[in-house]
Image (cartoon, rainbow, N blue to C red):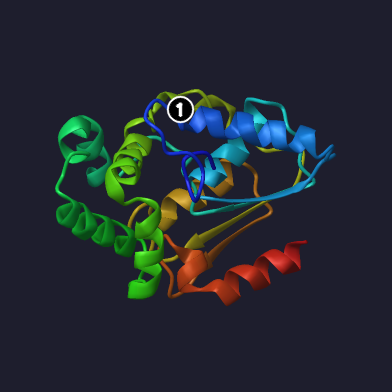
Amino acid sequence: MAGCGASSKAEGDDVSPDVQNRLLAALVDHWSLSQPHVVGHDFGGLAALRGNLVNGLQYARQTLIDNVALLPSGSPFFAHAQTYDGAISALQGFVHRATFGAFVNFGSLPGLPETVVEMYFQLWSGAEGQAAFYRQIAQSHPRTLEEIQDRLAPRAFPVHVLWGEFDRKIAVDRGARLAELLGAENFTPIPDAAHSVQKDAPEAVVGRVRSLL
């Protein structure tokens, strides 16, 4: 995902959702893959969806986990950060640290270990990292979802949808609706997990994905 991890966080970088599916399509082409198995979470799931619906990628199987797909989308925090991008990206570092910690922990049912929060924060801290964190939110324009709403229909390949039962960012009933629209073979709520289901219940996620592959 461009803009995430150790990738560039320079001012002027385009890290919007429509860039992510184009990168996915380019990667599939670069690796000369034919009908890969694709697993995507959150905006990674949106990239996988758009890779198929917009770029025409064909998958052997698609597994979607608590992913961004349906309108209306975005938490109140996302909406606030998009509206006041200039002000919030200029927060003092200690305020950004507190905001960032609250944001990532909101996605976890028990809360993430402090070492994990700090690991993530190091990638989004400092003048460049902090600005890039809020830039990514600002560039998550709903048009990338508007473009695919009418295309959400049963696919020609198997689709599986996994969802944290206690997801407070994208409620579990939205996952069930997405599974219905895509004609998914199954919809699997993951107990004792919120949005960061791969952190809250890693064994359940890995076990389920392995059984599908």
Report the residue at 50% width, 60% height from top.
163
- Amino acid of disc 1: Asp
Report the residue at 19% width, 31% height from top.
86
Disc 1: CA contacts within 10 A as few (<14), some (14-19) or many (>=20)? some
Quadrant of the image containing the C terminus? bottom right
- Residue 117 lies left or right of residue 209; in this view the side is left
Task: Name the spot of residue 116 as percent of width and height, x first.
Answer: 40, 69
Report the residue at 49% width, 33% height from top.
17
- Residue 17 lies left or right of residue 52; in this view the side is left
Which of 1 and 164 lies nearest the eye of the viewer?
Answer: 1
**Location of residue 185 with respect to 101 vertically, above or below:** above
**Location of residue 76 with respect to 52 vertically, above or below:** below
Task: Name the spot of residue 27 as percent of width and height, x first.
Answer: 71, 37
Q: Which residue is mark 1?
A: 14
**Location of residue 120 with respect to 50 vertically, above or below:** below
Quadrant of the image containing the N terminus? top right
Which of 51 and 149 lies nearest the eye of the viewer?
Answer: 51
Which of 20 and 68 lies nearest the eye of the viewer?
Answer: 20
Task: Name the spot of residue 6 as percent of width and height, x first.
Answer: 50, 49
**Could you say whether the residue bearing mark 1 is in a helix, strand or loop?**
loop
Report the residue at 65% width, 36% height from top.
24
Task: Name the spot of residue 38 as percent of width and height, x first.
Answer: 69, 49
Image label count? 1
| Res 153 visible | no
- Residue 32 lies left or right of residue 79; in this view the side is right
| Res 159 visible | yes
